[in-house]
Amino acid sequence: MRNIDFMKHRKFALTVSLVLVIASLVLLLTRGLNLGIDFTGGNVIQTEFETVPDISEVRDVISGIVAKGAMIQHFGEKGIIIRTNEDTEKSREDVVKALTAKYPDMKVTGFEKVGPVVGGELRRQAFIGVTIALVAILIYITLRFQFRFAVVSVVPLVHDVIIALGFFSITQMEIGSSFIAAILTIVGYSLNNTIIILDRVRENWGTLSREGIVNLVNKSLNQTLARTINTTLTTLFPVVALCVWGGPVLMAFSYAMLVGMIAGTWSSMMIATGLLCEWQGKK
Amino acid sequence: MNRTDRLRLWLVLIVVAGAACFAYFYRNGLNLGLDLRGGAHIVLQAKGTPENPLGDDSIDRLLAVLRNRIDQYGVAEPIIQKSGNDRIIVDLPGIQDPAAALELIGRTAQLDFREVLDSTGTPPPAPIRSNYDSDIQFVQAQERWQRAIDQLSNSSADFQARAKNTVGAIVAPAEEAGRFYLLGPVLLSGKDLVNAQVNPDSLGRLGVSLEFNDNGARLFEEATARLVGKQIAIVLDDVVISAPVVQDRIAGGHAQITGRFTADEAGRLAIMLKAGALPVAVEIAENRSVGPSLGADSVRQGLEAGLFGAGMVLVFMLIYYQFRGLAADLALAVTILLIFAGLIAFNATLTLPGIAGIILTLGMAVDGNVLIYERVKEEQKSGKTPMAALDSGFRKALVTILDSNITTLIAALVLFYFGSGSVRGFGVTLSVGLVASVFANIVVTRAILQLFVKRGKEIVRK
């Protein structure tokens, strides 16, 4: 069996993660997230053209109608997607009317309007949902393992979520309601990894006094290494496929999953275990 | 093969055959979300006023009226349900004209008949460019027209003041721009209506003919008798649709609304009047509409990504674990089958994030197999026979598989309870996928491997 001394680098790994988390938090506070209309309220219009006009041309048509500014992007091959922060039905109808007058070949393939009340509720719901999930998980692990394991397995989850959010702050990709689903899946996936490693640590726990915590954790990591690599690969295949072929609607979801999975694998192997070593070593 | 092994094998065969038959016979039972098949999703927020506060009763009546309107409009499989205390969700799958549907369900449709006390003059028609020789003349004509309209609006301020002094009087605009009416109290309202249908009048203009109940007929007769030679206004949602002059007393309870309707508008108005006015005003809180082509695109892209991802996983397992990989691949096929059977059985709705959830499950489902196989390898290294290694490998991996899946299931269930719409759909598919994959890992894989290993031993013995 391979015997890689993962825990030799634990201080370095913990520092890297700490820096990444702080950087993400700073980004979140200064640059913020590009929240979609699911959260902010507003109108989205998806259109399709025979020949796609210039974005700037479309912007000229709309700018007179939408006071609060609009975001206009290409969508697929022949489509253009227009997002405004005005959350009235009338605003949308005006935009469509003006565009149809200018481009008779335009087809509206879909639209979404979310009022301000619903957006606020979704934000609250997302926050409550994620919090409840984390607490429930904490309780379950405390029951099955011990409280210390529960803490070192929840820290990486917070780490993964913050880094995924930081990634979205840098790229300014739009966040919709499916992003909440992605975040909770990341939580599930990362936790899965952590539990499997900690499960091995628990199994080897009997040798603690003989080997010391660092050797014990290293042994457990090496024993589960083949599994970690294989499962990461088999999960990466579909996620990469989603990023490449999943289409524009799923893009934010797919990238959130990709970043979250990479962060999750890293944090399970280095952060949960590193923290456990530090904590146990203090005693 | 001992008794437990035989039982396990039978269990697998029965479950797979059962799920396959179920999924085959009920294959139309899989609900596609509106984001996949196209349609409109509308959330209405009821708005109470001090005079007309919200209550359970008014929401229930609101539901009934909406259901009535949508049924008469003719939408296949609409979903109309209460959400929270003051919201109603309306899902209209496959609808072609979402704007028309919105017009139908969002409008209060409060019909009143009132006496016309006074009205501003008829506004002049707007100038048309082709009637003028130059742009300058046209602009001047437009300005003149605007001034005339403004003047009419000013006199409506005077009406407002007069309305305050008369009990039950209101000021209402006409459908055409710039014209206002000062109206007396309600003579008769839509509550006394028994039927409404589209009917062209004697001049061939489209209109809606009304039929009142006995009480309505009596009120209408009294009003027309009193107001011969005067105007009665037909007011819909505080806008005067028409204000005919009463020629004679009208008995029998029939009347006709004539306005500037297109055939579609007249049809919708008839439906709204027949179904009744909304008991409270509503506001559109959320409105999403996906055209059928966009939905089909999403399905195709999801399928492509899913097939490719699944293909990669299957090939990887086969290369890395060889014949055991084949067992894992078979187990994965069973997982997919069980997911679809489960979604049909729970009457769940498959949404785009749901498809993403299934694709993810494919990758995570083989995790159980990986865990088991790595464990079995370890056991074999420590000197156990293949059969014994398989046995203890499964036993030791079981705890890990359960622990890791239950924690993920907690997250999935939270999504199911707290999420709404497509997020909820994702929670359902993820939960079903987790349960299906644990069954496939623990029971299906083991049954298949037991078969392989047994065969191998027998061959050796011969």
Image: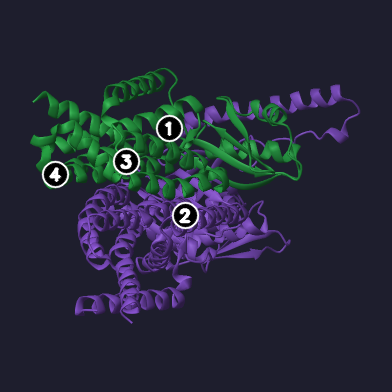
Chain colours: A green, B purple
* Residue B459 rendering spot, x and y as whole percentages: 35, 78
User: In what element is the residue under mark 1?
Assistant: helix
Determine which residue is flagged by label 1.
Answer: B164
Count how many numbered circles sit on residues in the image.
4
Are dots 3 and 4 on a single chain? yes
Q: Which residue is drawn at the image coordinates 26% and 29% (left, top)?
A: A7
Determine which residue is flagged by label 4.
Answer: A145
User: Quadrant location of the N terminus of chain A?
Assistant: top left
For residue A2, the mark is: 3
Which subunit holds the residue at mark 4? A
Which subunit holds the residue at mark 1? B
Q: Badges 3 and 4: C-beta atoms under 8 Å apart?
A: no
How far apart, in angstroms, are the residues tagged by discs 1 and 3? 91 Å
Q: Nearer the viewer, mark 2 or mark 3?
A: 3
- Decide: few, some or many residues near mark 1? Use Cα within 10 Å; few <14, some 14-19, many ≥20: few
Q: Which residue is drawn at the image coordinates 43% and 54% (left, top)?
A: B354
For the residue marked with disc 4, what is the amino acid?
Answer: Phe
State left or right for residue B372 relative to residue B260.
left
Q: In this view, does A204 lie above or below B253?
A: above
How far apart, in angstroms, are the residues tagged by discs 2 and 1? 81 Å
Q: Badges 4 and 2: C-beta atoms under 8 Å apart?
A: no
For the residue marked with disc 1, what is the amino acid?
Answer: Lys
Out of B224 and B311, give the one closest to the viewer: B311
Q: Nearer the viewer, mark 4 or mark 1?
A: 4
Q: Nearer the viewer, mark 1 or mark 3?
A: 3
- Decide: few, some or many residues near mark 4? Use Cα within 10 Å; few <14, some 14-19, many ≥20: some
| Image quadrant assignment for residue A100 | top right
- Direction bottom: furthest residue: B462
Sequence-first disc among 2 and 1: 1
For the residue marked with disc 3, what is the amino acid?
Answer: Arg
